[in-house]
Image (tube, rainbow, N blue to C red):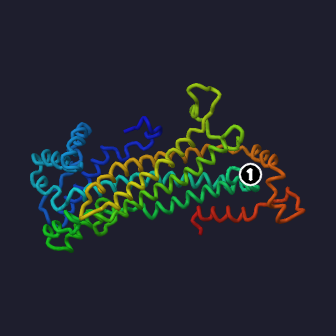
Amino acid sequence: MSDLLWPGDHRAGDLFTDASVVAAMIRVEHAWLTALAELGVAGITVPDDLAELVGPDDLPALAVGAESGGNPLIPLLKLLRSRLRGRNTAAAGWLHKGLTSQDVVDTALVLCLRDAIARIRADLLAQVGALSRLAEEHRETRMAGRTLTQHAIPITFGLKAAGWLTGILDARDQLAVAGKPPIQIGGAAGSLAAPAALAGGPARARELVAVTARHLGLPAREPWHTSRAPLTRVADAFVTCTDAWGKIANDVLVGARPEVHELIESTAAGRGGSSAMPNKQNPVHAVLIKRAALAAPPFAALVHAGAAAAVDERPDGGWHVEWATLRTLARRTVVAGAQTAELLAGLRVETGKMLATLHEARPGIDAEQQSITPGVAPDQPYLGATDEIIDAVLARAKGTV
């Protein structure tokens, strides 16, 4: 899967593709069958090759068939049963028994989100390392601080890098909270009625869910058919990431302007060229990261809108709007995370240009210092608690506070 109109989409690979969603739904069905057999509810031999019953050639028909019932699981079950019946009739009869479509689709979404979250966490870790190095290396690198596009007071680039790092750490922490979405199994109306009837009571039904969750490596909890916080939390965490990356991208875009020339993107592999102007070296990663930061919030808002539209025991459209929305948001967040990690790893800091701009900004940039401490020479440090702030952020990055 790749999107021509979203450059960089290939970085997300097979995350949340149609094939991976189908594979995730089959994993849920397999785990449920395994739980039924393990707890003695069904006297069956669980097929090891359930995933092999469906291949890439089946995806177009499954996509078309999804329209009839309104979700992709219904045609998938029909296909699985037809192919399983000839080799394991008992398992075919127990396939999906006690579940409802929403159980499988929701839990498959969680599995796909978990894979995306793992990729994003890895890139956040790389970003923390790169920004920690920049903050330490440039804690004495003087530059002009800017507010509302104008020169403000002198700062250091190390302080700016520590500010970027703070945003990344906030994103890391929010993703850690949201990044363990649980299994969602509740039966037809969220009461576990069918599992309880099959297994012999409520306690056994909950045990079925717990065993299924264990086989999938997911936390177990009560059904959340119409309480969608597990998904809105993930969506919000993704946007916190893109917000932090967007801030970095915006600063790089300003710093990369020829008249500023304080920050330069890596030009590896011919990156940043123009189709018509060979003189240009566009900060293309920063441009694409900013694009993702601009696009992400509406997707999270749509997930919230779906949650707010929940009605009865299964939403009529509010549930359905989540699927493609989460897929798009997850893939784009993964892409932006990889691009940001690469941007920071190759970022060039033009310290000489920063210092020259600071000198050119005098005496105006020293106005606040002169108003507070009149008569003090402007070449004296006016950096406040810069070192302490950098130290505190670095300690947080290392997990020592």
Rendered-image quadrant of the C terminus? bottom right
Quadrant of the rendered structure where residue 182 is?
bottom left
Q: Taking 215 as reference, is 136 left or right?
A: right
Displayed quadrant of residue 265: top right
Residue 27's x, y, as percent?
26, 53
Residue 11: image x %, image y %? 45, 42
In front of the other: 363 or 176: 363
Amino acid type indicated by mark 1: His
User: Residue placed at 14% from the left, 72% from the top?
Assistant: 200
- Total of numbered circles in the picture? 1
For the residue pair 311 and 292, the one nearer the viewer reads as 311
Residue 137 shows in this picture: no
**Residue drawn 55% across and 51% down?**
245
Task: Report x, y in % for residue 253.
Answer: 62, 43
Residue drawn at x 74%, y 51% as measured from the top left: 151
Q: Position of residue 34 (x, y in %)?
A: 21, 59
Q: Is residue 168 left or right of residue 74?
A: right
Establish if 177 lies above or below 59.
Answer: below
Location of residue 195 with respect to 110 vertically, above or below:
below
- Up the image or down, 274 lies above or below 346; here it is above
Residue holding disc 1: 151
